Amino acid sequence: MTAPSPSPAPSSPGSVTWQPAGSYEDILFDLCDAGIARITINRPHKRNAFRPRTVQELCDAFSRVRDNPKVGVVLFTGAGPAADGGWAFCSGGDQSVRGEGGYVDETGLPRLNVLDLQRLIRSLPKVVIALVAGYAIGGGQVLHLLCDLSLAAENAVFGQTGPRVGSFDGGFGAGYLARLVGQRKAREIWFLCRQYGAEQALAMGLVNAVVPLAELEAEGVRWAREVLQHSPTAIRCLKAAFNAETDGLAGIQELAGQATHLFYRTEEGQEGRNAFLEKRSPDFSDAPWLP
């Protein structure tokens, strides 16, 4: 397996020094002092297709990012190139371990735990930027879709294979894709199983920008640094607000949770808590009834 090349010492807005932050079999997890994490699917020999272990490790890494107050942005990518020179962000589920009820883990249990990963990326109160080099196909295309921002290398290829391999994603993979590119294009992507290059993806709104392969990570770091210049609370509330428009009650719950988080930090919210703990009636007289 080929790991990404080490980054150079910081010398520009697109340069950081990565430090390993965990030991995994299928992924790489790195942090830097700039407040950015990098999570890499590390199965280039399988075009970075995921198996249950891969997804479990991704969930662990994203959960660690969520709980790390020093990290505000995640770069999500795939290792490469493979021994044959091919690149991939993620080519979806590893069909070689697909059983009758899902993807079979080491214990023989069939799983679809990528759905847990999808929800985790979606609800993470931090910005996730996909860095797509090579194939983002099938379930990999859905993972890229769920990231907040997506940067594509010039060699990126997007598409769906579900109906061709007896599978489909009727959740975010269909519904959110239609919100992003429109019903007609989304149906084309799923029904025809064609593949689309980076510039086509940019034209349909699947990605934010296309850059040379050699500059992909540096551009991702530059975008991350711009995000990190802004209010963390505003960013997390905006992400929840965008999700609330598309994700039904789950999205509304997420936005409401961010509002509760803010309210707990006010004197009014703390007065209610303190009064309960002190076994007295709360005094909210200092809190105005604003228009």
Image (cartoon, rainbow, N blue to C red):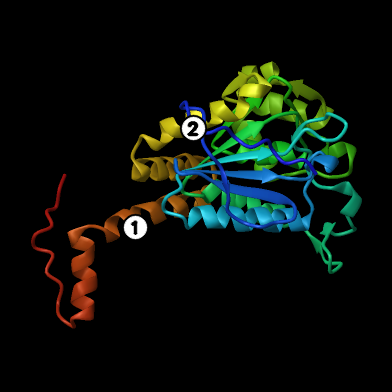
**With 177 as the anchor, is 269 left or right in this view?**
left
Q: Callout 1: few (<14), some (14-19), or many (20+) C-alpha neighbours within 10 Å?
A: few
**With 193 as the anchor, is 132 left or right in this view?**
left
Outermost bottom residue? 279
The answer for how far apart the CA atoms under marks 1 and 2 are is: 38 Å
Disc 1 is placed on an element classified as helix
Residue at 22% across / 57% down in the picture? 266
Residue at 23% across / 79% down in the picture? 277
Q: Of the residues under marks 1 and 2, which one precedes in the sequence?
A: 2
Of the pair 24 and 109, the residue shown nearer to us: 24
Estimate the x, y position of residue 267 in percent, counting from the top left. 18, 60
Of the pair 238 and 8, the residue shown nearer to us: 8
Query: Which residue, given by chain and number where applicable, does mark 2 sit on?
Result: 10
Disc 2 is placed on an element classified as loop
Q: Quadrant of the N terminus?
A: top right
Give amino acid for label 2.
Pro
Residue 206 is at least partly visible in this image: no
Against 211, residue 264 (above or below) is: below
**With 223 as the anchor, is 54 left or right in this view?**
right
Estimate the x, y position of residue 256 in percent, counting from the top left. 39, 53
